[in-house]
Amino acid sequence: MQMEIKVGKPTFVLPQFTGQYMAREASIAPEEYETAEHFRTLLDNNKPDEVLAELAKYYDIELSPAMLTLKAQIYFALKKYDQAEKTYLIVLSRMPQLVRAHSDLGQIYLIRNDYKKAREQFALAISYGSNEAIIHGQLAYLNLTTYGAYSAISEYQQAMALEPENPQWQQGLLASLTQAGMFEAANALVEELLAKHPRDDELWLNRAAISLKMHDTKGALTGLEMALLLGNKDPNNLKTAAQLHLQLGSYDRALELLKMDLSKTSFDMSTLNEYLSWMAQADRWNEASDLLNSVAGKVDKMSQRDQSAYFLQRAKVYKHQNKVSSAKSDFEKSLDLDPTNGDALLAYAKFESDNKNYVRAEMLYARAEGIDGKEKQALLGKAQLYIDMQDYKAALPQMRAALLKYPDLLELKDSIEVVENILRAKQSAHEN
């Protein structure tokens, strides 16, 4: 939600002189009337430089606040912001309650990204009676970004009351209500806007986000699906929609969305790994296999490291599908492509251990032990391997080494004690 700043041509409204004027309005002096008419003609003919040249002939103290304001406006339109700021400040030193000068000065500060000063000027303009939607909206935006949602709500409401069809104020109020945790009000607003603009995908996304905040999974999914139907294909939205479908058990649609994301030209193996982990958590191994097959044509274009990760994932799927020979083949492919793939070494070692190929498993655990970040799992895996083999004498040193290197493994102390008791019992039985 970015603030849009439009600086148009300067306008100079020529009022009739009425003697006394309100302190928040600037009127030209009677003796300036003829000059003002001349300036208006020049401005109508798009000759601001000529007006500025003629105004430069006067000292600032010779000009009325109205003429000085015109001078500042022309500087502003010509993007001479330093001169415009200086001139507006002179005007305000003479007429502190001049609304237009405060609002224009606020615009200059906003352009310069000096949000603190911009906010001060817009607040002053409103306090002195400005009722322009743009000023209320800009103050709301600056309050939202500087002080938080609650300070922005009333100003966005005021801007929207003046310009109810302005999408900028609608979005701002919606964001403020949502950030303030006023989800019922935010939801009521978005439903009202959707009734008028049912094909606005951003509104459906807002509805989805609010529904998520309200723990309404089905409502969130409806909003996301409508946004997708209307053409929004943002990867994060596809991903979130897939997650929600998985939560609700609609696996076919989840798989369809994940495939849609993976069909992009740029392929990210880390994203595929994430999606496969979701499928694994849901115990949907056939869908995981389908997902892997959907990108099989891209494997040759991957780096060797990513190819290794791909075949590791496929091996895991084959393992859970009880396709032992296929799993073994893909574990081997994974390690051929990247012999330092620690995850592949550990997963393959566990696979071989489960299939009672203990010698091969022991060798794989030994290799994993030398990979950075995998030593702990390798030590524990090898210890479990020896316990499965009932070789408690070999398991004990592995367990002690793991505890010595990783003292946070407190539960290992009990396991060590159990193994020590088993060895003592065996020794005692042997002696007897």
Image (cartoon, helix red, strand yellow):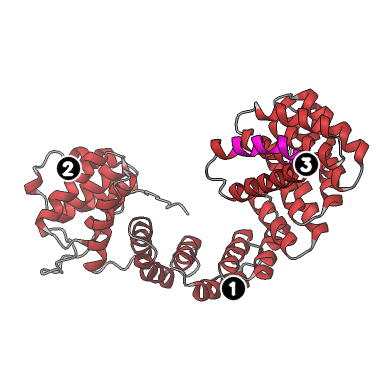
The relative height of residue 215 versus residue 245 in the rendered view (above or below) is below
Q: Is residue 405 left or right of residue 82?
A: right
Which element carries disc 2, helix, strand or loop?
helix
| Res. 191 mark | 1
Residue 353, given in percent of the width and then of the height, sits at: 82, 39
Specify few, some or many for label 1: CA neighbours under 10 Å numbering under 14, 14-19, or 20 or more: some
Residue 399 or residue 222, whichever sits in front:
399
Q: Which residue is mark 3?
A: 430
Looking at marks 2 and 3 on the same chain, the residue that comes earlier in the sequence is marked by: 2
Magenta part mainly helix, strand or loop?
helix
Image coordinates for residue 34, horizontal then vertical, percent: 17, 53
Q: What SS does tag 3 mark?
A: helix
Residue 308 found in image quarter: top right
Q: From the viewer's perspective, is 220 left or right of 336? A: left
Answer with mark 1 or mark 3, whichever residue precedes in sequence: 1
| Structural distance between the alpha carbons of marks 2 and 3 | 113 Å
* Residue stretch rendered in magenta on the structure: 384-402
